[in-house]
Image (cartoon, rainbow, N blue to C red):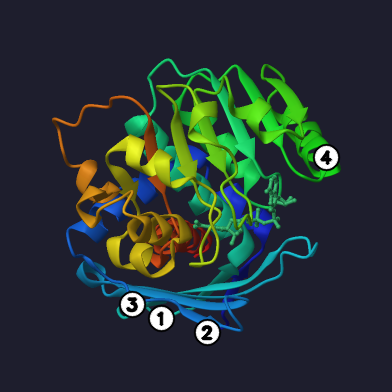
Amino acid sequence: MEPIFLSPEQVLAAVPMREAIEAVRQAFVGVSRGEFEVPFRTNLRDGQFLVMATHHIPTATAVVKTMSLNFDGRDPAIVGTVSWNDLHRTGHLLADASAITALRTGAASGVATDLLARPDAATLTVVGSGGQAAMQVRAVCAVRPIAAVILVDRIAERAEALAEVLRREMPVLQIKVCTDVVDAVTDADIICCATTATEPLFPLSALRPDVHVNAIGAFRPTMRELPDDLLADAGVVYIDQQEAILEESGEVIHALASGALDEANLEEIGRALQDTGLRRDGRTVFKTVGIAAQDWAIARLLSERNAATESAHD
Ligand SMILES: NC(=O)c1ccc[n+]([C@@H]2O[C@H](COP(=O)([O-])OP(=O)(O)OC[C@H]3O[C@@H](n4cnc5c(N)ncnc54)[C@H](O)[C@@H]3O)[C@@H](O)[C@H]2O)c1
């Protein structure tokens, strides 16, 4: 049987953001329940080539994602393929990794925002206006009544270009562009950090006392978007997966080394999602380096949709 390849457009048309959020929510719970084998990802050329894999034990399905990452102006920065594997079915599904990555990373912020942000949060600031940023906005808008968005990038044209796209798509949103990160975060109820920064993007003192922060950008020990004292102030730092975070999150590694954070303060979001007594208080932080279970969640939806289309054509 010929392999099927889904383009970025086909991926995005098949999986609306709300469904991506629900699928990633279930995957995070599954990770914390031990339903996935999630080995460390393979890093080559200091993170410029990545191979990520996971096996979902209950369904005997697996994904393997291979990517190249070039943040020196290549558009998109992330290029590659997700391969869906099923022990019980024939057929082989391949899909564009750039679209799946942006969708499932947006969805992760959607899950965390839904769990942790104030229910009436209305202002969002996104720092970094590259390949991940649009999905961060779409995801947060899917779970909170956002009225105003500020887009920040050190390259103003990138923020302007993203603003144009989002204004056409969501005309009711008030969208502003800014190049000063501290100005942009000061009044935000929710902040998404989606940069390649190696130093904290803002000081703790710039943030509202009830802000929720999603930090998706740093994925190497040398990268960092958040200051240590924000992690300390939050008390609990919600994360995608403990082992991956301890291996790859520059923020967490730095804060543990400085003594600002203790490993006991890290909590997997999949566990928090099952905690019916969870109460949000003060500033909240979600740090994700991205795990293959998120890719699996989207690839499973694509595989189910593809199977349904095929049987309709029989
Ligand atoms: N956690 C995850 O699951 C996950 C998934 C995908 C990508 N990422 C990471 O997210 C980051 C962004 O990915 P992308 O595809 O959007 O990259 P990109 O290169 O397309 O965009 C990054 C943007 O951040 C801006 N930027 C960098 N440093 C900045 C700073 N200090 N202040 C303001 N703007 C700054 C750049 O100008 C650029 O426009 C990368 O590090 C990537 O590896 C993480």
Q: Earlier in the sequence, mark 1 or mark 2?
A: 2
Whether 148 is drawn above or below 304: the answer is above
Closest to the camera, between mark 3 and mark 4, is 4
For marks 3 and 4, give the CA distance: 38 Å
Instruction: Report if the CB atoms under discs 3 and 4 are less than 8 Å apart.
Output: no
> What amino acid does circle 4 point to?
Ala
Closest to the camera, between mark 1 and mark 4, is 4
Q: Earlier in the sequence, mark 3 or mark 2?
A: 2
For marks 1 and 3, give the CA distance: 25 Å
Q: Earlier in the sequence, mark 1 or mark 3?
A: 3
The numbered mark at residue 39 is 3
In the picture of the structure, the residue carrying the numbered disc 1 is: 90
List x then y, in percent, for residue 198: 60, 58
Instruction: Report if the CB atoms under discs 1 and 2 are less than 8 Å apart.
Output: yes
On screen, residue 291 versus residue 269, left or right, reads right
Q: Secondary structure at mark 3?
A: loop
Whether 46 is drawn above or below 237: the answer is below
For marks 1 and 4, give the CA distance: 48 Å
Instruction: Report if the CB atoms under discs 4 and 2 are less than 8 Å apart.
Output: no
The numbered mark at residue 156 is 4
